[in-house]
Image (cartoon, rainbow, N blue to C red):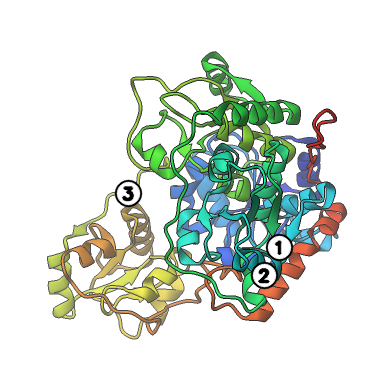
């Protein structure tokens, strides 16, 4: 097959990774096929969301970008669209995923593979202590002096948690551990759903010199379920305010670790120099909690709570070799969460710095993070009542671009679900020709981009529902559940074996077995540039 775009060879990409040069290897398939097989540092960026996600995930328009799929016909159109969006160095991966496989290069499974592989390497090289689920349950039931700290996002903790556990997302652990376990004899158990965040969380406390005995819950909530033990649901235990008496110890430890790992300390002038360097990609992340971020943050900084940033580097830093600067806010920066996060990213091979400066008293931005996106084309719009009347008259066919799980949970009655990249096939599968097509999505911009695609595929009038399904529900209109009206396969999201409590035991065990093999995969792959920090000789850890 001939291509109008230049090609990048497999070894060219791997050499860039080995040498630390900036490059973005972009998998434009949906998340589920990506999770089945991909190169280590491939970032999944759906072809159907390029206009929404490329501006913040690929912030420098002249960064080298290499695009691939696995023969689905998505890569070349996506690469051309990236050029239209202003990217000037876009190539196709020679042979796509099949070419990578044929070259004998390593392929990885699941999502967030770089971070998960790094977590396994940390345990392998540092011997991070862990306890099996049965032993932790015995400690809890015996009334032992133990605290369980859940290092996941709060919403994950709410879904399911270890009995008695407290939500302390990863970046908060070193800042708050001494407050939650002030007696050095108290045993601290760190858990997540699987392995990575509990291992990184436990090793964070050990690296920072927290005096308590620390262990990870071996295999997290998966291990708990496989042991036949019961989880809690809907809990809301969270950390409290920081005790100022404990803050200096945490600051000293975090900042010393960042320096030892090779992370830089930037003041305002240093940040300005990095921001002005147009030859390098720069990601700016505020690593505090989402609530703190929304209360006020620096302009130009997105929200990436530190534990999730370490867990999802392929999402928050799609350009391998880029620069990353971290802030932990204020009005007075706490000087713990940013350097602790930086000390992990530096070990993962990133060129990272933390901002050692208080937030300015003026000019802060309130509200949730709103990533940069390309302005969508103008298309006709409808209000809820107008669409309801059209549906009642049989004059509108609604195509829902929501995530498939959200569509199945509840959608506008009669709406058909489709992926934006599958609209041509979706139109062909409709049982009868539409009179008018109305695109709906949780994000109006996505609906507008899809509507523009539809206008190129059909002569039927196309419009967008203002506010999407949320506006429909807010107007008191009913929603319909179920997956009877799907116009394509539900491949937009990979079903993680560690989500919820209903995953098959075989899938949970297979996931753990895969994680156990990641250290060997890293060795075979040979491109990672990970470097695990050894204990400081004068402290032993």
Q: CA distance from mark 3 to mark 2?
A: 49 Å
146 on left or right of 39: left
Residue 130: image location, x then y, percent: 74, 58
Q: Element under label 3?
A: loop
First along the sequence among labels 3 and 2: 2
Snapshot quadrant of residue 532: top right
10 Å crowding of disc 2: few (<14), some (14-19), many (20+) = many
In this rendering, does residue 216 appear at all? yes
In this view, 137 is above or below 530: below
| Residue annotated with mark 1 | 218
* Residue found 45% across the figure and 67% down from its top: 419
Q: Element under label 2?
A: helix
Snapshot quadrant of residue 407: bottom left
First along the sequence among labels 1 and 2: 1
* Residue found 64% across the figure and 49% down from its top: 186
* Residue found 54% across the figure and 13% down from its top: 269
Point out the image quarter for the N terminus: bottom right
In this view, 151 is above or below 84: below
Q: Is 454 in front, or is 53?
A: 53
10 Å crowding of disc 3: few (<14), some (14-19), many (20+) = few
Residue 24: image location, x then y, percent: 65, 44
Q: Is 130 in front, or is 35?
A: 130
Point out the image quarter for the C terminus: top right
Q: Is 317 in front, or is 85?
A: 317
Q: Element under label 1?
A: loop
Q: CA distance from mark 3 to mark 1?
A: 50 Å
In this rendering, does residue 67 appear at all? no
175 on left or right of 416: right
| Residue annotated with mark 2 | 223
Query: Residue 377: which disc?
Result: 3
10 Å crowding of disc 1: few (<14), some (14-19), many (20+) = many
Residue 414: image location, x then y, percent: 27, 80
């Amino acid at each position: 097959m001939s291509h109008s775009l230049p090609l990048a060879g497999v070894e060219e990409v791997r050499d860039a990774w080995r040498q630390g040069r900036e490059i973005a290897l972009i998998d434009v398939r949906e998340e589920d096929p990506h999770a089945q097989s991909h190169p280590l540092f491939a970032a999944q960026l759906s072809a159907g969301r390029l206009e929404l996600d490329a501006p913040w995930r690929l912030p420098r328009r002249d960064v080298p970008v290499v695009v691939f799929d696995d023969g689905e016909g998505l890569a070349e159109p996506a690469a051309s669209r990236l050029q239209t969006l202003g990217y000037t160095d876009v190539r196709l991966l020679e042979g796509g995923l099949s070419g990578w496989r044929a070259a004998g290069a390593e392929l990885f499974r699941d999502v967030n593979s770089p971070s998960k592989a790094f977590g396994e390497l940390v345990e392998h090289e540092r011997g991070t202590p862990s306890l099996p689920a049965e032993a932790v349950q015995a400690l809890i039931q015996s009334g032992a002096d133990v605290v369980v700290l859940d290092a996941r996002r709060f919403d994950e903790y709410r879904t399911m948690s270890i009995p008695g556990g407290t939500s302390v997302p990863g970046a908060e652990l070193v800042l708050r551990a001494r407050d939650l376990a002030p007696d050095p004899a108290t045993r601290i158990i760190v858990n997540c759903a699987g392995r990575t965040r509990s291992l990184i969380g436990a090793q964070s406390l050990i690296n920072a010199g927290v005096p308590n005995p620390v262990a990870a819950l071996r295999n997290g909530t998966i291990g708990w379920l496989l042991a036949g033990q019961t989880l809690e649901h809907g809990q809301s235990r969270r950390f409290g305010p920081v005790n100022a008496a404990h803050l200096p110890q945490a600051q000293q430890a975090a900042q010393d670790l960042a320096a030892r790992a090779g992370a830089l300390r930037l003041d305002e002038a240093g940040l300005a120099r990095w921001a002005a360097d147009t030859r390098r990609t720069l990601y700016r992340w505020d690593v505090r909690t989402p609530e703190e971020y929304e209360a006020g943050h620096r302009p130009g900084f997105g929200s990436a709570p530190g534990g999730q940033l370490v867990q999802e580097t392929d999402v928050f830093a799609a350009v391998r070799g880029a620069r990353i600067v971290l802030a932990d806010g204020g009005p007075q920066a706490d000087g713990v969460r940013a350097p602790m996060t930086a000390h992990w990213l530096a070990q993962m091979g990133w060129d990272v710095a933390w901002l050692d400066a208080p937030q300015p008293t003026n000019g802060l931005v309130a509200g949730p993070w709103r990533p940069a996106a390309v302005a969508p084309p103008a298309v006709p719009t409808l209000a809820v009542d107008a669409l309801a009347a059209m549906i009642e008259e049989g004059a509108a066919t609604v195509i829902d671009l929501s995530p498939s799980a959200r569509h199945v949970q509840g959608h506008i009655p009669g709406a058909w679900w489709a992926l934006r990249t599958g609209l041509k096939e979706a139109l062909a599968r409709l049982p009868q020709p539409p009179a008018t097509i109305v695109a709906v999505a949780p994000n109006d911009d996505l609906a507008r981009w899809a509507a523009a695609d539809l206008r190129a595929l059909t002569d039927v009038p196309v419009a967008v529902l203002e506010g999407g399904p949320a506006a429909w529900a807010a107007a008191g209109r009913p929603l319909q559940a179920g997956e009877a009206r799907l116009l394509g396969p539900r491949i937009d999201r990979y079903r993680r074996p560690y989500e919820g409590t209903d995953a098959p035991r075989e899938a949970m065990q297979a996931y753990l077995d895969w994680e156990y093999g990641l250290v060997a995969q890293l060795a075979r792959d040979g491109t990672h540039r990970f470097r695990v920090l050894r204990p400081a000789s004068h402290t032993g850890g």
